[in-house]
Image (tube, rainbow, N blue to C red):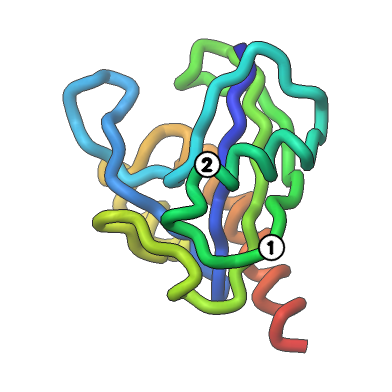
Amino acid sequence: MPIVRIAPVCNGKIYVVPRMAADGESLRLDLPIEESGEHIPTKSEKTARKIKEKYQAHIRTDASPRFCVQYKSKPHHGRTTYLYVLPLRQEDEIHFHEGKFVSAEDIANHPDAYSHNLQEESELLDMAAELWKDFHTS
């Protein structure tokens, strides 16, 4: 089953929340939105929008998730992961319990605090976050 992950980004940073790690024993910081699906069409913006809508109590933006990359996830035993970016104009447009914005540098400097998926995605998400930051400030 494929997986959709949505990374909220704002001001060059990535929004993360504490989630149970793949080992089922420890909390690690990870993206707040991750869903498994039976069939997810490649680059399906519609699927990502529907998933985002499930979290509308936590997200106050009309922005739609933007497809970023598709890859095979080692932590998810080789399942296909579709990674999306949700660009936010202001950090207060999202709120999950204990959520916070972090930089890719934070992830690189403290890898034990972050999920393996997020560690794999951090460089790509850093580039996407910086691009959206530049786009929104120009």
Looking at the image, is 49 positioned above or below residue 87? above
The answer to whether 95 appears left or right of 61 in the picture is: left
Picture coordinates of residue 48, whole percent (x, y):
68, 40
Residue 68 occupies quadrant = top right
Spatial separation of the CA atoms under disc 2 and disc 1: 14 Å
Label 2: state its secondary structure. helix
* Image quadrant occupied by the C terminus: bottom right
Figure disc tally: 2
Mark 2 residue type = Lys
Question: Residue beneath label 1, please?
Answer: 63
Q: Residue 54 got which mark?
A: 2
Residue 79 occupies quadrant = top right
Callout 2: few (<14), some (14-19), or many (20+) C-alpha neighbours within 10 Å? Answer: few
What residue sits 63% from the left and 56% below the top? 86
Mark 1 residue type = Ala
Picture coordinates of residue 82, whole percent (x, y):
67, 32
Residue in the foreground of this view, choosing between 7 and 106: 7
CB of mark 2 within 8 Å of CB of mark 1? no
Picture coordinates of residue 104, whole percent (x, y):
48, 59
Callout 1: few (<14), some (14-19), or many (20+) C-alpha neighbours within 10 Å? Answer: few
Q: Which of the two labelled residues, at mark 2 and mark 1, occupies the earlier sequence position?
A: 2
The answer to whether 123 appears left or right of 43 in the picture is: left
Residue in the foreground of this view, choosing between 108 and 115: 115
